[in-house]
Image: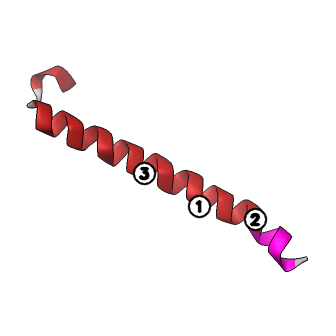
Amino acid sequence: MLNRLPILQQMEHRNILKKTEWQKKRASQKFLNLPKKLD
């Protein structure tokens, strides 16, 4: 399905996926770091 999309759209889609993955990682890191900061 991705192959049918224009290249720019494919790149955009990948960037969005990377961004959401990055945000999830950031969110989980913040969550894990909270207890340490409280101590």
Quadrant housing the C terminus:
bottom right
In this picture, is 10 found above or below 1?
A: below
Residue drawn at 75 percent across, 60 percent down: 32
In this picture, is 5 found above or below 38?
A: above
Residue drawn at 11 percent across, 23 percent down: 4
Circles 2 and 3 in contact, beta carbons < 8 Å:
no
- Horizontal relation, residue 14 to residue 7: left or right: right
Dot 1 or dot 2, earlier in sequence: 1
Number of other residues with Cα within 10 Å of mark 1, as a class: few under 14, some 14 to 19, many 20 or more:
few
Q: How far apart are the alpha carbons under marks 3 and 1?
A: 10 Å
What residue is pinned by disc 2? 33
Number of other residues with Cα within 10 Å of mark 3, as a class: few under 14, some 14 to 19, many 20 or more:
few
Q: How far apart are the alpha carbons under marks 2 and 3?
A: 20 Å
Question: Which type of secondary structure does the marked residue at label 3 adopt?
Answer: helix
- Horizontal relation, residue 20 to residue 15: left or right: right
Circles 3 and 1 in contact, beta carbons < 8 Å:
no
36 falls in the magenta region: yes
Give the residue type at disc 2.
Asn
Quadrant of the rendered image containing residue 31 = bottom right
Q: Which mark is residue 20?
A: 3
- Horizontal relation, residue 39 to residue 34: left or right: right
Q: What stretch is highlighted in magenta?
A: 34-38
- Horizontal relation, residue 25 to residue 31: left or right: left
Residue reaching furthest right? 39
Q: Position of residue 12 (x, y in %)?
A: 22, 43
Give the residue type at disc 1.
Ala
